């Protein structure tokens, strides 16, 4: 039986950040991971001459050296800022609905406003006001609100976060309708909704607006070597600080005694003692399967009853024998839709009809080192719920997934013709693939649906035994920046509680 100050379950983005953060601040930490490599979504795989990025499309919240944002400080504190290289992208995205709209937005606020105002001159004033609101919300949301929420003073919230109060529970569609009349402009400015997993009429603007500003002002990035390079760097930082990791070792049970965490038993039957456990597993798995308690707190049961498991994804990984220039690609990130109506696009996530929208990411557009010379690495993704794929008979699964992949490729070819003819390597992942790899309900990639009740305005820490902490998409927004920050925040909380307890002894 081995004792640690803390145990981390899962080496995804949040788990790695939590482990590195705690170990670097002096807590003896054990990291358990059921796979043989670190990363979760932050990984890559090789097929032929190509290394495919599993999930990272654009990294937000990093900022430039001259104008840094929160993630840069997070990486510095975790000891990885100088262990990886960051590749700045020149465009926020290209949004294209063939026959309706085709706009590429530069990753620059004045340039972005100019492009949009030139395309929609009658809405120029509203565009400038909208972008300004996104920036103000971004600062309130990330810089002010966390402190005000901890203080629990409604008066201070109204005074210091007036825009968050005004727009905190309004849908993105509602706010876009307030500012604009042209449906093409609204669709263009709402294009990021797939990054958050809900259509605009369900997605809180407090999530979309700040995200839009983060990418437009603080720039979108890739990580050279893919997100696997960051996962490796976080693990290296953890190990250099003296941490211990066990791969191919899943957690089987979190033990408690009189309402306090006491340790973890692995799938191999080994028991490790610790007063603190950070779970990077889903909250559903953590509370329903890992915890040794039979009765959950009412707050936890209520949360699970009103929360909806979020969307998964269908992904086609393509290695092409042509360069991005030869294919005609003009931006690293491309939102391609067959309909201006995002609700119509989203509804195809619930069936196997022709996909109405996809995200095409060309990872070597801004950095040729992402692919062999003269070739391209492309990811195609559309939203799909796990239930759709769970209902497919096993004998039909293989043919169904490759037939659906063909339809997704045909959608992308409406903007970039010739993809099919240049495929050298292909791999396909369905929600069932995601479910098996991440061990998440429904293969959900963003945790619970990020509706208004899941925003920080209402979200509360789930009440479990003392010493249990959650980190990752199931305790906050999904995506790379939020999960890195979630793990870092959990680490700081555990360290603070640890030091307080030591001082009291």
Image (cartoon, grey):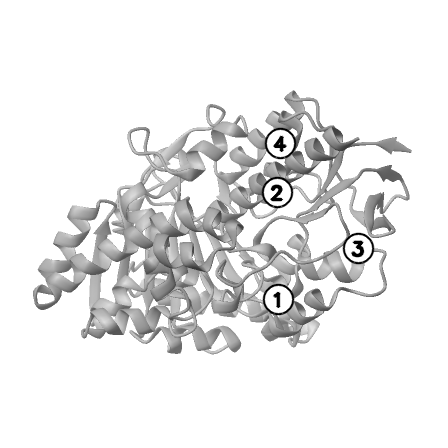
Q: Secondary structure under badge 4?
A: helix
Q: Which residue is mark 3?
A: 290
Measured in 3D between alpha carbons, the distance from the residue under mark 3 to the one under mark 2, in whole angstroms, is 19 Å
Q: Position of residue 391 (x, y in %)?
A: 65, 77
Disc on res. 263: none
Do callouts 1 and 2 mark residues in contact (Cβ within 8 Å)?
A: no
Residue 245 can be seen in this image: no
- The x and y percentages for residue 372 are 41, 35
Q: Is residue 18 left or right of residue 213?
A: right
**Contact between labelled residues 3 and 1, with CB atoms less than 8 Å apart:** no
Q: Which residue is mark 2?
A: 490
Between the C-alphas of marks 3 and 4, the distance is 23 Å
**Mark 3 Cα within 10 Å, few/some/many (few <14, many 20+)?**
some
Earlier sequence position, callout 1 versus callout 2: 1
Q: Point out the tag, 3 or 4, that comes first from the N-terminus.
A: 4
Give the number of the mark in front: 4 or 2.
2
Question: Residue 396, relative to residue 212: is it above or below?
Answer: below
Which of pointers 1 and 4 indicates the residue nearer the eye? 4
Front label number (1 vs 3): 3
Q: Secondary structure at mark 2?
A: helix
Residue 118 in view, yes or no: yes
Residue 398's tag is 1
């Amino acid at each position: 039986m081995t004792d640690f100050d803390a145990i981390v379950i899962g080496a995804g983005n949040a788990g790695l950040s939590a482990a590195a953060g705690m170990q670097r601040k002096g807590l003896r930490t054990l990291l358990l991971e059921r796979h043989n490599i670190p990363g979760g979504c932050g990984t890559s795989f090789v097929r032929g001459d190509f290394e495919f990025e599993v999930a990272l499309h654009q990294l937000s919240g990093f900022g430039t050296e001259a104008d840094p944002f929160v993630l840069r400080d997070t990486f510095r504190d975790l000891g990885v800022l100088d262990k990886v290289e960051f590749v700045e992208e020149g465009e926020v995205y290209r949004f294209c609905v063939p026959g309706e709209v085709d706009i590429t937005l530069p990753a620059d606020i004045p340039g972005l406003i100019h492009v949009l105002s030139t395309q929609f001159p009658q809405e120029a004033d509203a565009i400038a006001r909208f972008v300004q609101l996104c920036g103000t919300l971004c600062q309130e949301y990330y810089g002010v609100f966390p402190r005000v929420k901890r203080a629990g003073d409604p008066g201070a919230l109204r005074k210091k976060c007036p825009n968050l109060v005004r727009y905190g529970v309004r849908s993105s569609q509602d706010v876009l309708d307030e500012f604009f009349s042209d449906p093409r402009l609204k669709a263009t400015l709402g294009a990021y909704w797939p990054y958050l997993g809900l259509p605009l009429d369900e997605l809180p603007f407090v999530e979309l607006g700040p995200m839009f500003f983060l990418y437009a002002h603080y720039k979108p990035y890739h990580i050279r070597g893919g997100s696997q390079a960051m996962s490796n760097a976080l693990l290296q930082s953890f190990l250099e600080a003296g941490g211990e990791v066990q791969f191919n070792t899943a957690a089987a049970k979190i033990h408690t005694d009189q309402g306090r965490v006491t340790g973890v038993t692995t799938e191999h039957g080994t028991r490790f003692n610790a007063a603190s456990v950070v779970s990077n597993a889903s909250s559903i798995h953590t509370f329903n399967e890992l915890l040794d308690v039979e009765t959950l707190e009412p707050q936890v049961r209520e949360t699970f009853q009103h929360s909806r498991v979020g969307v998964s994804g269908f992904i086609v990984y393509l290695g092409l024998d042509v360069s991005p220039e030869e294919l005609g690609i003009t931006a690293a990130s491309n939102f391609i839709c067959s309909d201006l109506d995002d609700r119509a696009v989203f509804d195809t996530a619930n069936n196997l009809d022709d996909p109405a929208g996809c995200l095409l990411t060309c990872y070597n557009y801004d950095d040729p080192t992402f692919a062999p010379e003269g070739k391209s690495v492309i990811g195609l993704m559309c939203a799909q719920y796990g239930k759709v794929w769970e209902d497919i008979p096993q004998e039909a699964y293989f043919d169904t997934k490759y037939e659906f992949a063909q339809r997704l490729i045909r959608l992308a070819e409406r903007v970039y013709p010739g993809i099919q003819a240049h495929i050298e390597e292909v791999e396909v992942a369905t929600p069932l693939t995601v479910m098996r790899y991440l061990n998440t309900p429904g293969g959900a990639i963003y945790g619970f649906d990020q509706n208004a009740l899941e925003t920080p305005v209402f979200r509360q820490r789930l009440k479990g035994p003392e010493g249990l902490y959650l980190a990752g998409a199931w305790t906050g927004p999904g995506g790379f920046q939020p999960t890195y920050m979630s793990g870092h925040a959990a680490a700081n909380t555990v360290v603070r509680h640890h030091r307080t307890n030591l001082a009291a002894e």
